C-alpha cells in the first residue's frame, strides 16, 4: 500500500516516543509556530553554545508527521554546528519538495529519510516542515542575541 | 416517488470516478462543498455556450436572454427561501454575504438604525465559523462596539441560560449559525429572535449548513438577514446569497460601489438603485447564478425528503460510531436538533492521520479545526475528523467509513 511509504515504522515510533518533547526551562530563543490550516502548534526552544546547537526542546500538538518530524529534528541537530544544521535543513527541504523522486541521503538525514514519502502528499509537506521552520526561526533569533 | 439515494447519486458524475488505485469514491465532505449534478453543470456551461452576455446592459438579444436567465435564478432562490424577489442579492459566496452586511453596517451614518458606536454591542456565538465571527470582530473594532457571545456547552449546544444579559438593550446585531459546521447542532432560533427583536436588534443567520439540507422559510424563521453559499447546495462555486427583509435593505448602506448599483451619478456624488441592485456592483457571476437556479433540482426531490434521508443516515452513523472504542463524537449524540455534520476524535490517532488513512480507502472526510478554531479550542480538541452527509450518500458510504475507522485503529496501533 502506498500509504506505507508515508507511515514508516520510524515515524510511528517517534510519534509514540517523541524525543526532547519537554520544554527546557532555560533557552536562548523560544518560538511558537502554528499551521493555521489544520491547527497544529509547536513551541520550540533553542540554546546555542557559540555556533553549536547545544539544546533543542519543544512541546506541541499535531499529527504523527509533524510530531515525528520535529522529534527526528532534535536527534539530528543537537550537537551540530549551525552551518551543519543549515545544510541538513536544506537537504531536508529539498527532499520534501522532491515529489517522490528522491529518497534522501541517509548519511546526512539519518532517520529523517523516513519522511521521504511525505513529498508524495502535497497537503502533508507543511506538517513535516512545521518544526523545521520553528528551528530556523529560533536559531536565527538565538544567534542575533550573541552579537 | 420514494427517495432513492442510489439513483440520485447517478445524477452526480463525479461519484462515478475512482480514488487511489481504483477505490470507489465515498464522498463525506459535503459540509465543505457539495458535489454537482449534471443539471447544474449543464445550466452553467449552457449559459456560456448559448446566452453569455453582460446582464442588465446591452441592446441585443443575448443581453436579454442573459438577463432573463439571471433574474429567473433570482426568482428561483426567492421561492426556495419563501422570500420576495427583490430581497435576494447575489454575492460571490456566503463569506462575501456576511462581510457585505458587516461592512455595510460600518458605512451607516449617524441616525441610520445600523450606525454603531461605542456602548453598542454585537452578539455572536462560540460555535461560529470564522466567516461569521471575524467580520463582526472587525466591525466591533472599527466602531468601538463590544463583541459578546453565547458560550457552548459540553454537549455542543448553545448556553442560553444568560440570554437576557448576553442580548441586552445595547445589542444592535445578533449573528449566529443555523447549524454548526463542526457539531451539527441546529440552534433554537425562536428564543433568540424574540429576545433580539425585543431590544431592537437585527438577527443575521449563517445558513450555509442549513439551507442545502432542510426546508428554510425566512418569514417563518423571523430573522432579518441570511447568508448561504451556492456550492454547498449542489450549485456552482462563486455564487452566494445574501437575503434581507425589504425594509432593512432599503436602510442598509451599500458595501461595494460601482457600476449597476447606482441611480444617478455626477462627478462628485452618486445615489443608489433600490435593492437588490444596490448591493450588486459590477458585472455579477452570471453563469454561476444561473447554475444556482438549479436549486429546482433540490425542490423536485423535496428538501424535506432530503432532510429526512440525512436524519436517518445521521442516526445510522451515530449508532455505528458509538460501537468503536476510544471514539468520541464532538457534538450531540442523538438526531434531535442535529444535522448531518458529524465530528469525532479517535483516541491518540490524530485526525490528519485518520483522514489520510481514510483517503487511502477512497473515503473523503475533512480534518482540522473546520474554520471554527475558538470552538475546537473551547472543546479541548485541537482538531477533529468530520464526516458530513448529503442527499447522495447511502448507508454503504457509512459502512465504508465505520470500517475505515476501525481499520485505521489497527493500522496505527501496529
Image: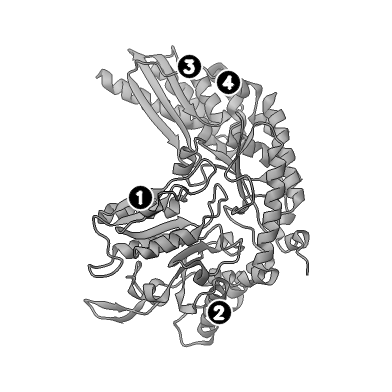
Residue at 53% of width from left, 26% of height from top? A67
Residue at 70% of width from left, 35% of height from top? B324
Name the mark nearer the viewer: 1 or 3. 1
Task: Classify A107 as above or below B228.
Answer: above
Name the mark nearer the viewer: 1 or 4. 1
Kindly indicate whether the residue at mark 4 contacts the one at mark 2 (C-beta within 8 angstroms).
Answer: no
- Horizontal placement of B253 versus B33: left or right? left
Kindly indicate whether the residue at mark 3 contacts the one at mark 1 (C-beta within 8 angstroms).
Answer: no
- Tag 1 secondary structure: strand
Where is residue A48? Give x, y as percent. Answer: 35, 15
- Horizontal placement of B275 versus B291: left or right? left
Q: Are callouts 4 and 3 both on one chain? A: yes
Q: State which tag comes first along the sequence, 4 or 3.
A: 4
Q: State which tag comes first along the sequence, 2 or 1.
A: 2
* C-alpha separation, residue under disc 4 versus residue under disc 3: 11 Å
* C-alpha separation, residue under disc 2 versus residue under disc 3: 63 Å
Provide the chain ID for the residue under circle 1: B
The residue where tag 3 is placed is: A20
Query: Residue A14 has which mark?
Result: 4
Where is residue A117? Give x, y as percent. Answer: 62, 31
The residue where tag 2 is placed is: B72
Amino acid at each position: 500500500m502506498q500509504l506505507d511509504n508515508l507511515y514508516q515504522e520510524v515515524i510511528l515510533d517517534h510519534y509514540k516516543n517523541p524525543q526532547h518533547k519537554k520544554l527546557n526551562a532555560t533557552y536562548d530563543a523560544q518560538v511558537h509556530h502554528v499551521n493555521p490550516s489544520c491547527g497544529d502548534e509547536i513551541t520550540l526552544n533553542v540554546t546555542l553554545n557559540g555556533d553549536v546547537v547545544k539544546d533543542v526542546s519543544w512541546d506541541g500538538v499535531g499529527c504523527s508527521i509533524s510530531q515525528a518530524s520535529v522529534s527526528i529534528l532534535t536527534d539530528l541537530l543537537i550537537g551540530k554546528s549551525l552551518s551543519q544544521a543549515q545544510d541538513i535543513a536544506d537537504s531536508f527541504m529539498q527532499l520534501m519538495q522532491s515529489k517522490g523522486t528522491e529518497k534522501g541521503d541517509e548519511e546526512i538525514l539519518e532517520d529523517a529519510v523516513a519522511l521521504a514519502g511525505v513529498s508524495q502528499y502535497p497537503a502533508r509537506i507543511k506538517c513535516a516542515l512545521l518544526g523545521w521552520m520553528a528551528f530556523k526561526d529560533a536559531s536565527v533569533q538565538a544567534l542575533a542575541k550573541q552579537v | 416517488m420514494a427517495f432513492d439515494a442510489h439513483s440520485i447519486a447517478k445524477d452526480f458524475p463525479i461519484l462515478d470516478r475512482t480514488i487511489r488505485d481504483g477505490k470507489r469514491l465515498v464522498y463525506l465532505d459535503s459540509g465543505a462543498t457539495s458535489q454537482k449534478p449534471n443539471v447544474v453543470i449543464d445550466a452553467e456551461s449552457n449559459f456560456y455556450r448559448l446566452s453569455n452576455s453582460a446582464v442588465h446592459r446591452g441592446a441585443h438579444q443575448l443581453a436579454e436572454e442573459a438577463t432573463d436567465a439571471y433574474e429567473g435564478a433570482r426568482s428561483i432562490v426567492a421561492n426556495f427561501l419563501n422570500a420576495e424577489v427583490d430581497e435576494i442579492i447575489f454575492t460571490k459566496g456566503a463569506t462575501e454575504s456576511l462581510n457585505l452586511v458587516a461592512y455595510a453596517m460600518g458605512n451607516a451614518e449617524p441616525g441610520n438604525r445600523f450606525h454603531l458606536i461605542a456602548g453598542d454591542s454585537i452578539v455572536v456565538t462560540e460555535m461560529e465559523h470564522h466567516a461569521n465571527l471575524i467580520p463582526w470582530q472587525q466591525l466591533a473594532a472599527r466602531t468601538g462596539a463590544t463583541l459578546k457571545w453565547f458560550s457552548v456547552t459540553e454537549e455542543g449546544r448553545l448556553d442560553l441560560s444568560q440570554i437576557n444579559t448576553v442580548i441586552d438593550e445595547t445589542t444592535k446585531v445578533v449573528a449566529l449559525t443555523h447549524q454548526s459546521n463542526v457539531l451539527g447542532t441546529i440552534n433554537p432560533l425562536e428564543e433568540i429572535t424574540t429576545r433580539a427583536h425585543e431590544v431592537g436588534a437585527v438577527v443575521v443567520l449563517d445558513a450555509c449548513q442549513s439551507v442545502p439540507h432542510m426546508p428554510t422559510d425566512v418569514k417563518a424563521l423571523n430573522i432579518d438577514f441570511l447568508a448561504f453559499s451556492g456550492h454547498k447546495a449542489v450549485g456552482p462555486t462563486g455564487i452566494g446569497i445574501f437575503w434581507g427583509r425589504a425594509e432593512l435593505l432599503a436602510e442598509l448602506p451599500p458595501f461595494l460601489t460601482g457600476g449597476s448599483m447606482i441611480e444617478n451619478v455626477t462627478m462628485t456624488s452618486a445615489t443608489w438603485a433600490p435593492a437588490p441592485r444596490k448591493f450588486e456592483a459590477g458585472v455579477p457571476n452570471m453563469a454561476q447564478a444561473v447554475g444556482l437556479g438549479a436549486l429546482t433540482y433540490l425542490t423536485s426531490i423535496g428538501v424535506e425528503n432530503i432532510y429526512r434521508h440525512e436524519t436517518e443516515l445521521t442516526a445510522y452513523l451515530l449508532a455505528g460510531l458509538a460501537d468503536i472504542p476510544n471514539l468520541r463524537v464532538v457534538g450531540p449524540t442523538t438526531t434531535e436538533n442535529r444535522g448531518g455534520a458529524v465530528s469525532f476524535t479517535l483516541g491518540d490517532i490524530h485526525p490528519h492521520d485518520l483522514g489520510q488513512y481514510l483517503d487511502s480507502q477512497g473515503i473523503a472526510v475533512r480534518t482540522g479545526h473546520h474554520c471554527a478554531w475558538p470552538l475546537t479550542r473551547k472543546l479541548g480538541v485541537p482538531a477533529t475528523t468530520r464526516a458530513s452527509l448529503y442527499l447522495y450518500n447511502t448507508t454503504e458510504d457509512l459502512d465504508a467509513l465505520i470500517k475505515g475507522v476501525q481499520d485505521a485503529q489497527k493500522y496505527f496501533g501496529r
